[in-house]
């Protein structure tokens, strides 16, 4: 066999196999068609039955709706008749409305009265607290005033004490200077007589007033007749303030003058002069 014959044989075998498959399929397909047909008929019957059921239900629903509409219309008519028969008197309605408003107003008035009473009690309590606080403040102010007065008095006493201490210090320095001068006089001729004169004069209390001030010099209104001695130092003071010392270098019977030394303040006419602050 040549090649062409072989090819033809192979083609024929393939055709036989394909044809056998087709024939087998054709033998079994009619059964499948019948099942499909029966299933389609069943579905058609079910659909038809369902359609009839839906139609029946729709008809029943429409009948129920119409019945309900009729019933609603009847009820509305009856309600209108009832409303017409039971229409209240406008006067009664206005009276009820006014009574309701009056009750509401009374309720509000009661609430407001309670609020006002509560506010009054609260204000009275605050007023009482304010009065108590004012009384406490008044007592504190009195205490402060007393303490201020005491402090001022103590300050005055302190200042006077300081001035007194300064005056004593000045007096001590003056005495030291006087002692030094007396020692010098003791070493000079006639010192005994001078010392006796000074001692005698120092025992007399001198009180004078400044009558004139010229630069560092001042004059007083007492002199040798009142016991003023040349070379002595006298205190110059103004009220409770120490001004300085007056060292006398000119003495007449009724007046004296000298240099102002150790000044704390500037001397003025009217300042007082003494030789003993204790008297």
Image: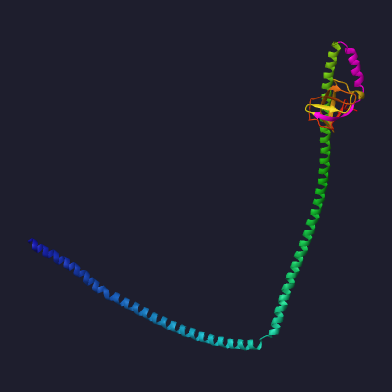
Q: Name the spot of residue 123 as percent of width and height, x first.
A: 77, 59
Q: Quadrant of the C terminus?
A: top right
* Residue ID at (71%, 76%): 100
Q: Name the spot of residue 151 as percent of width and height, x first.
A: 82, 38
Q: Name the spot of residue 187 as percent of width and height, x first.
A: 85, 11
Image height of 59 relative to 248, above or below? below
Give the camera-side residue of 28 and 176: 176
In the picture provided, is 92 more to the left or to the right than 191? left
In the picture provided, is 212 more to the left or to the right than 44? right
* Residue ID at (51%, 84%): 65
Image height of 128 relative to 63, above or below? above
Is residue 161 one of those drawn in magenta? no
Q: Name the spot of residue 103 as percent of width and height, x first.
A: 73, 74
Q: Quadrant of the N terminus?
A: bottom left
* Residue ID at (82%, 38%): 152
Give the camera-side residue of 241 and 194: 194
Give the camera-side residue of 72 and 59: 72
Identify the residue at the far left of this view: 2
Image height of 45 relative to 110, above or below? below
- Find the magenta span and give its range: 189-213
């Amino acid at each position: 066999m040549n090649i062409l014959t072989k090819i033809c044989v192979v083609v024929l075998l393939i055709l036989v196999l394909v044809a056998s498959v087709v024939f087998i399929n054709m033998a079994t397909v009619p059964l499948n068609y019948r099942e499909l047909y029966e299933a389609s008929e069943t579905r058609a019957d079910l659909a038809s039955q369902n359609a009839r059921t839906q139609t029946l239900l729709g008809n029943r629903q429409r009948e129920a709706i119409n019945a309900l509409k009729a019933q609603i219309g009847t009820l509305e008519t009856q309600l209108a008749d009832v409303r017409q028969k039971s229409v209240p008197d406008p006067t009664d309605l206005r009276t009820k409305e006014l009574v309701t408003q009056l009750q509401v107003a009374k309720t509000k008035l009661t609430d407001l009265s309670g609020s006002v009473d509560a506010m009054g009690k609260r204000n009275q309590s605050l007023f009482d607290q304010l009065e108590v606080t004012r009384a406490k403040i008044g007592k504190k102010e009195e205490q402060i005033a007393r303490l201020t007065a005491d402090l001022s008095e103590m300050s005055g006493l302190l200042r006077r004490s300081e001035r007194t201490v300064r005056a004593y210090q000045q007096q001590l320095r003056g005495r030291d200077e006087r002692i030094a001068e007396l020692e010098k006089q003791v070493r000079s001729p006639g010192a005994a007589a001078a010392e006796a004169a000074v001692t005698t004069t120092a025992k007399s209390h001198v009180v004078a007033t400044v009558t004139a001030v010229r630069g560092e010099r001042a004059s007083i209104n007492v002199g040798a007749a009142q016991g003023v001695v040349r070379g002595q130092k006298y205190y110059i003071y103004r009220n409770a303030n120490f001004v300085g010392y007056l060292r006398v270098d000119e003495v007449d019977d009724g007046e004296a003058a000298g240099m102002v030394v150790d000044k704390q303040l500037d001397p003025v006419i009217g300042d007082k002069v003494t030789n003993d602050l204790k008297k």
